[in-house]
Amino acid sequence: MKGKLILPYIMLNLLSGVGSGVMFWLSNYDPIWIGAFFATFPMPFFLMVLSQAFSLARTSKRLPLIQLINLAAVATVGTLLYVRGGPATTAEFAALGIAIFGAVTVQWYIWVFSNYGRKKSAAIVRGKALPELPLQRLDETETTSASFTGEKTLLVFFRANWCPFCMNQLKEVRAKADRLAKAGVKVKFISNQGIDNSAKLAKDLELPDHFEILQDKDLRAAKNLGIEDIGGAPAGMPGYPNDTVMATVIALDENGRVLFGDETDNYRVRPHPDTFLHVFENESDVTRLTA
């Protein structure tokens, strides 16, 4: 259900913000429309523009600045109506309605949509081997996680090319290519978005030899780990499946045992590479965790 609501949410808030800006001009610069604008426009602008312009791979969980702007804008509209007194005009009621709509939808996005509500995977346990993960290479040949044995491996399960936070996370990991190569780590970017979409991504990222994008056909690997997100993809994304994966990072040693696992409960909160790369480089950690 959430996947069906996110694009209408973004578009309605965007249109409400643009409409408020137009009304500010048509109303001879009535400040009440400034409040309506800032109650609705900042969130879609953040998701569609700022997250990409600033290559954001993560945000705070509750987006306090966005919430502050949103609630201050709603308070501004309410205060102006109170100070003016008398019966509100149709335009003023419209501005109030837009502001309230912005407040409700922004809070829904932050407190409901962004959260997976996931339970910790019983398969991702430090010091333990993962269950076998059936995967597919971009040439459509089959492989499994058993092929990772004998080399340190970083698995990054991502949602799809349509997710700016995923794309920025992958770029962050790609930027650590030299450090990963020095530590002898192979990197696997994994999603169920389809061979064509992943091939385009591989070309865009210009991946070095120790990086590979793998296809998780029918979410078989994700389901073995308990990290599938059924119906989690935004509706209206042509060329992409409706189901996706909950963003997950797993570091494996040469024997296929888990050194590190991040199971974020919020798709906007991703681990920085510096929080897990050290497990590949610190031999004492490896020995302690896999003994």
Image (cartoon, rainbow, N blue to C red):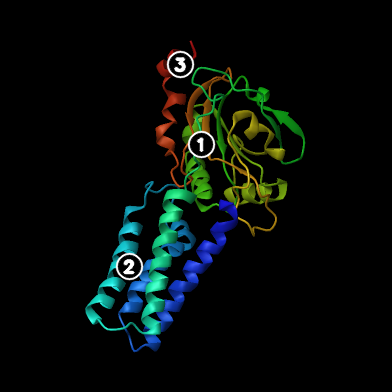
Q: Are marks 1 and 2 in contact (CB under 8 Å)?
A: no
Report the amino acid beneath label 1: Arg
Can the viewer see residue 55 in this picture? no
Mark 1 neighbour density, 10 Å: few (under 14) some (14–19) many (20 or more): some
Give the side of residue 287 with respect to residue 223, left or right.
left
Spatial CA span between label 1 and label 2: 32 Å
Q: Name the mark on residue 118.
A: 1
**Along the line of sight, the residue nearer the viewer: 286 or 8:** 8
Q: Are marks 1 and 3 in contact (CB under 8 Å)?
A: no
Q: Residue furthest front?
A: 87
**Marks 1 and 3, how far apart at CA:** 25 Å
The label number, if any, that marks residue 74 in the structure image:
2
The three-letter code of the residue at mark 2 reads Val
Who's the residue at 39% across and 62% down the image?
A: 103
Q: In the displayed orientation, state which residue is furthest to the top.
A: 291
Q: Position of residue 142 (x, y in %)?
A: 76, 32
Q: Which mark is residue 289?
A: 3
Q: Amino acid at mark 3?
A: Leu
